[in-house]
Amino acid sequence: MTSLSRRASLEFCDDFKPQSWNDVFINFRLLYLPITKIITIFAHIFIRSGDNTKNTALQTMNKDIKKFLDFPTESSAQIINRKEVEVTAPDGEVFTVYCQIGALLNEETRNYELHWLEVLFDKNFSLDKEGMVQNIWREAMQFGIGNVLGISTGTRHTDRARIGVRIREIREERGMEARDLAKLAGIDAANLSRIENGKYSVGLDILAKIATALGKKVDFVDL
């Protein structure tokens, strides 16, 4: 086996037990390459090395791709059409990703790219949806995952924006500075700004603290 193929095999350890998605990215870094590039690398090895190296390299590659595909994620992705993939994040919010995964002809390659999207959403999941989408964008471009062309703001963006606007309206009616409300609610002023701008998915506990600080309460009302 050539030194290149030995290095490739070392990328995937049989006893690999990841503790975080960062471990997945580090230990499976060869998989950042598109499948076609991996095949090209191994093709150069095959030309020089003969059938034994060819079979060993293919077995190693197939085994470790399967290991990666079997690794569980909280996010789930499904192809809608040739241009759209829907990804459900760990909190249930759905994002539309414009990409070229649906146009791929090989089913194994489609599943491989879909799983990388799931990995990206798990790895970068955050209540700060703007920052989350930006991080997913950056890493998708950096590692050539899915040929991503665009990502939506999520299905809950309208609700986040509506709640944020209402918080700002009440705060301004009270004549209260944003930093003072943030201090009363026990949250960071930057996070309050994101909440008021509909860019942060606020949990019920934080929302209740903000409401209390404004002399309000969270309740169910008729639509």
Image (cartoon, rainbow, N blue to C red):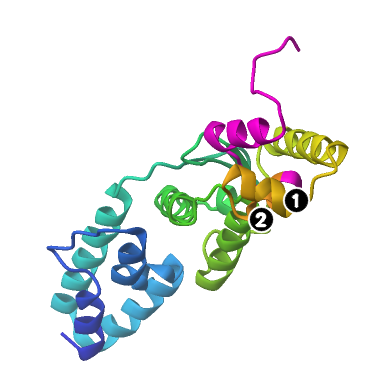
Q: Looking at the image, do the residues carrying marks 2 and 1 touch, with CB atoms under 8 Å apart?
A: yes
- Which quadrant of the rendered structure holds the N terminus? bottom left
Tell me if I can see residue 97 in this picture.
no
The part of the image, by quadrant, that contains residue 26 is: bottom left
Q: Looking at the image, which is closer to me, 118 or 102? A: 118
Query: Badge 2 local density, few (<14 within 10 Å), some, or many (20+)?
Result: some
Would you place residue 154 above or below residue 1 in this image?
above
- Which quadrant of the rendered structure holds the C terminus? top right
Return the x and y of residue 173 as percentages of the image width and height.
87, 36
Q: What residue did someone put label 1 on? A: 178
Q: Write the start and end of the magenta stretch as one range.
A: 196-223
Q: Amino acid at mark 2?
A: Ala
Q: What residue did someone put label 2 on? A: 189
Q: Is residue 54 magenta?
A: no
Q: Is residue 204 magenta?
A: yes
The part of the image, by quadrant, that contains residue 57 is: bottom left
| Residue at figure coordinates x 28%, y 48% from the top left | 70
Return the x and y of residue 46 as percentages of the image width and height.
26, 81
| Residue at figure coordinates x 55%, y 64% from the top left | 140
| Residue at figure coordinates x 76%, y 37% from the top left | 167
